Every structure is written in C-alpha cells, then in structure tokens.
Amino acid sequence: MKSTIKDMFEALWAQPIDTIRSGFKEAPPALADYIPTDLNITHERVPVSDGSDIEIRIYKAATTSKGAGMFYVSHGGGWVVGSHDVEEAQNRLVAGKAGVVVVSVDYRL
C-alpha cells in the first residue's frame, strides 16, 4: 500500500510531542553550499520577566561594520517545536550577505 503525504503527516502528529521536539533538536540544520560559514556566532543567555533565562544566538560577519543594522528572529515552530536551528540558514545568509547583526531568540516552548 502506497503512503500518501496525508498518511505520513498523520503518523507524525500521532507521536508524543516530546518525540517530535527531540526530532527537531537532533536534526542538523540544512546548509546549502552558498550559505556563509565564516561568521562569528555567539550564544548568550538573557533574563526574562519571570526570572528565568533564555538563549539568544548572535550572528556577525567579519566584515560587519560598527553601527550595522540588527535583524531580530523568533524561530518557527508555533510555540511547540523548533529552535535556533530552524532558521540557521536564513540567519547565516542575512548576516553574511546583508552585513547586519542577526539576533535569534530561542523562546520557551
């Protein structure tokens, strides 16, 4: 019996949410050949209003000038799944090609 895309999605969403989350976190980001890799990427933790902290990831190209613009990213995942890696290729491309500082916020799921 041939599976349809609908069947595959139904099988995926039938999994416990923790299984889906771990799948997102374990998969490496997909980086095409044209995505810059020579960036300065830092990971920092910042406090939020309830006293806990969340991670931010900051992307800068070596050629980023002082006073460059900032591009704020809140990754996809619908507040359920996802991480910085969901937008990794986009963040690297924007930082490397546009010369801006990219700040990716990893909100709590």
Image (tube, rainbow, N blue to C red):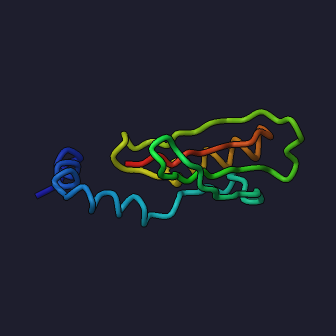
Q: In which quarter of the image is residue 102?
A: top right
| Residue 25 picture location, percent across and down | 42, 61
Residue 49 vertical placement versus 92 (above, below): above
Q: Which residue lies furthest to the left in this view?
A: 1
Q: Is residue 22 left or right of residue 41?
A: left
Residue drawn 89% across the image and 40% down it: 66
Residue 17, position as x, y percentages in the image: 24, 55
Residue 13: image x %, image y %?
Answer: 21, 50
Judging depth in this view, the residue of 97 and 8 nearest the camera is: 97
| Numbered marks: total | 0
Q: Could you tell whether 50 is left or right of 94 in the image?
A: left
Name the spot of residue 65 as percent of width and height, x first.
89, 41
Q: From this viewpoint, which residue is outermost toward the bottom? A: 26
The extreme front residue here reads 51
| Quarter placement of the N terminus | bottom left
Q: In this view, does 55 lie above or below 76?
A: below
Point 72% across, 54% down: residue? 36
Q: Say which residue appears at 37% left-offset and 42% top-offset.
A: 79
User: Residue at left 59%, top 45%?
Assistant: 104
